[in-house]
Amino acid sequence: QVQLVESGGGLVQAGGSLRLSCAASGRIFSSYAMGWFRQAPGKEREIVAVIRWSGGSTYYADSVKGRFTISTDNAKNMVYLQMNSLKPEDTAVYYCAARPGGGWNEAYWGQGTQVTVSS
């Protein structure tokens, strides 16, 4: 079993920055994919960024490319999402997920953290 706890959300003005943290516990293998997702009111959950637990290649949604950075700190069992140049449309609940294999519907999920960007 893997447990994930997100933190770092809050209210920020457009153009500002936030860093989300995801504390992971349990057995996580280097092959796991770690992802950040978000869900805005009335919208479906969407992928934001993905990285392998061991680091390396990353994936970003087009909407956040160049503004967000995903990273891991294996020594601390942490996953981060640095968010810069925030826009009101980034407002959402952000979720951390750990995918052992298969699809994201088989992943472990955190409880989410609210990010609100004011204009």
Image (cartoon, grey):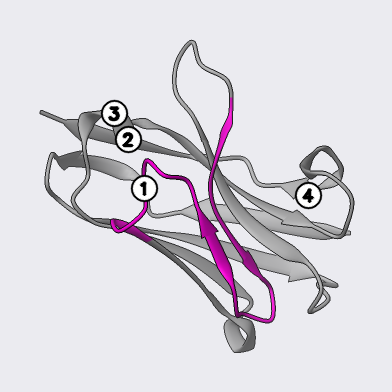
Label whose residue precedes the other's in the sequence (1 or 2): 1
Q: Which residue is mark 3?
A: 89
Q: Which mark is residue 108?
A: 4
Look at the picture and state if 9 lies above or below 24: above
Q: Quadrant of residue 26?
A: bottom right
State left or right for residue 79 relative to residue 113.
right
Q: Which residue is mark 1?
A: 64
Residue in view at x 83 percent, y 44 percent: 103
Q: Amino acid at mark 2?
A: Asp
Label whose residue precedes the other's in the sequence (3 or 1): 1
Residue 102 point in image, percent of width and height: 89, 50
Q: Amino acid at mark 4?
A: Tyr
Which portion, as a residue range, is magenta? Answer: 45-68
Report crowding for label 3: few under 14, some 14 to 19, many 20 or more residues within 10 A (C-alpha): few
Q: CA distance from mark 2 to mark 4?
A: 23 Å
Q: Amino acid at mark 3?
A: Glu
Q: Which residue is mark 2?
A: 90
Label whose residue precedes the other's in the sequence (2 or 4): 2
Report crowding for label 1: few under 14, some 14 to 19, many 20 or more residues within 10 A (C-alpha): some
Residue mark closest to the camera, 4 vs 1:
1
Look at the picture and state if 98 lies above or below 112: below
